[in-house]
Image (cartoon, rainbow, N blue to C red):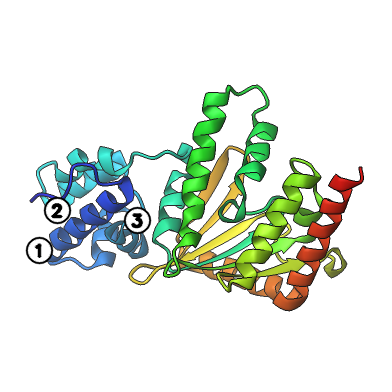
Amino acid sequence: MHVTGPKDLDPASRRVMVGEELRHARERAGLTQQALGELLFVSGSYVGQMEAGTRRILPDMAERLDEALGTAGFFVRHGVKANRSSHPEYFAEAAEAEALATKIRQYGAMLIPGLLQTPDYARAVFLDYQPTAPDQEIDKLLAARIARARLLDNPTGPQLWAILDEAVLRRPVGGASVMAGNLRHIAHLMHARRIIAQVLPFAAGGHASQHGSLKLMYFDDAPPLAFIEAPVTGLLLDEPTVVARLELSYDLLRASALSPKRSLALIESVAQDYAHEEQHP
């Protein structure tokens, strides 16, 4: 068993190829995803996500796969290269799944979601979180964030539906000029029909995701994933009943939010207010 291809494959592409080998090995062993999952003490959905490359094959899992499938150390050998990432460890798996998603549904509770951030806004966020970090570290984080946002440059990339809490618009991260620039960027993406966005207004009161931000990711050949993030930690969820409950939360948020048309008008109005503030402090 071997993986062919260029030596400089990015980790996501390599992980997809290793996932294909996992599917072949499972089928040769005559096992369903559910049956293999029972041997590994995970769900059949988890196996499907490893096969699709949307979930990493972690070192302990690689050992169990080699043992269950008799693959002579293949998954242990190829797991390291497939798991390299420019993102923080707690977020790496979610970022890599995001790159393979066909649809993304996201709620931003406090900050503009990463895929929609301009470089100036992202830099301000990183400096707020790590005010003593050296420029080299901030530049590395910023480069990874900019690379993620390039997903939206591709017209065949994922369909992004973002709900922004009004607090996201009103909190002047980086100052008035930075906020004006980022809100105009979001408005441009909406006008270009590259994204769908809604604003959840303060007037909506309590809502279904008061625990914080939420991201749902959908794939052609794997079950959906949900990601919940907090400072320096995050949780990637695949249990179908949990994902379904979070999907309901998102649907309720969408129902409480302003329409995309009214949201666009509000985003452009707030951007104009920030621009006026910058010109007349």
What's the distance in space between the residues labelled 3 and 1, CA to CA?
20 Å
Identify the residue at image location x=67%, y=53%.
112
Mark 2 sits on what residue? Answer: 69
Q: Is residue 204 above or below residue 229?
A: below
- The residue that label 3 is drawn on is 42
| Among numbered discs 3 and 1, the one appearing first in the sequence | 1
Q: Nearer the viewer, mark 3 or mark 1?
A: 1
Q: Nearer the viewer, residue 243 or 4?
A: 4
**What residue does disc 1 label?**
28
Please name the amino acid that badge 2 sits on.
Leu
Q: Are marks 1 and 2 in contact (CB under 8 Å)?
A: yes
> Which of the pair 29/185 is nearer the observer?
185
Q: Position of residue 201 (x, y in %)?
A: 81, 66
Q: In the drawing, does residue 139 fall left or right of residue 75? A: right
Q: Secondary structure at mark 3?
A: loop
Query: Is the residue marked by circle 2 packed among few (<14), some (14-19), or many (20+) residues within 10 Å?
Result: some
Distance from disc 1 to disc 2, alpha carbons, whole Å, reads 9 Å
- The residue that appears at 55% across and 46% down in the rendered structure is 234
Helix, strand or loop at mark 2: helix
Of residue 205 and residue 274, the one placed in the foreground of this image is: 274
